[in-house]
Amino acid sequence: MKTKKKNRFLTFCFSALPGAAEMYMGFMKMGVSLMLLFFLVCILSAWLYQGALVMIAIVVWFYSFFHANHLAGLSDEEFDQVKDDYLMGMEGIPGVRSVIDKNYKWVAGVLIFLGVCFLWNSIEDLLRDILPEAYKFIPRMMWRIGNYIPSLVIGVGIIYIGVKMIKGKERSLIEEHDDQDSGEGSGF
């Protein structure tokens, strides 16, 4: 689909939904990636009971709104030069593939964790349906535990990554300091 300038009023109306105005103007890659990012952040926020993540969705919404209206305000020559790319360097799935290849253990861990969460919810639903009323406390207990596990695991993961980053920074500062000390004493 060829990108071309469209009606400014309709662009403004479509810009209320992240990515819709970009798609309306023919920038499908931009629009889809903005829309996916917005809705994925909203879904993760609700699933993990982390309302703070909604702040990211709000930033994505504002970015998309102003980006679409900026595109609509470009001159015809400038508009024709805009490339339809995915957001955040996602152009070309092979690039994403190389990131997955480099971090396959982390990606595998996240996929396993998500799989366990889905299984947990499915088993809890199944037990709620098949157990007699006297044993309904089991799925209720599973539901309560299952609601907190994702947030706890992700919280521990964030702390772990933060500690690793601090230790890595300390290590690089110590190495830099050692390099400076060895350079000072070796000169005449």
Image (spheres, rainbow, N blue to C red):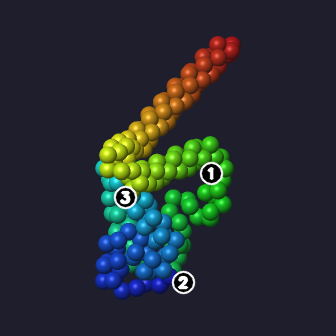
Alpha carbon of mark 1 to alpha carbon of mark 3: how far? 23 Å
Residue type pointed to by label 2: Met
Tell us which disc is closer to us: 1 or 2: 1
- Which residue is depicted at the point 37% across and 58% down? 42
Alpha carbon of mark 1 to alpha carbon of mark 2: how far? 30 Å
Q: Which residue position is annotated with label 3?
A: 42
Residue type pointed to by label 3: Cys
Which of the two residues, 128 or 135, is positioned nearer the viewer here? 135
Residue 141 visible (yes or no) = yes
Q: Is residue 29 left or right of residue 129?
A: right
Q: Residue 79: x, y in percent?
A: 47, 78
Which of the two residues, 133 or 13, is positioned nearer the viewer here? 133
Image quarter of the N terminus: bottom right
User: In which quarter of the view is residue 152 placed?
Assistant: top left
Which of the two residues, 68 or 90, is positioned nearer the viewer here? 90
- Which residue is depicted at the point 56% across and 50% down? 111
- Which residue is depicted at the point 50% across and 63% down? 87
Mark 2 residue element: loop
Residue type pointed to by label 1: Ile
Q: Residue 100: x, y in percent?
A: 62, 51
Q: Which residue position is annotated with label 1?
A: 100
Q: Which residue position is annotated with label 2?
A: 1
Q: Earlier in the sequence, mark 1 or mark 3?
A: 3
| Disc 1 packing (10 Å; few <14; some 14–19; many ≥20) | some
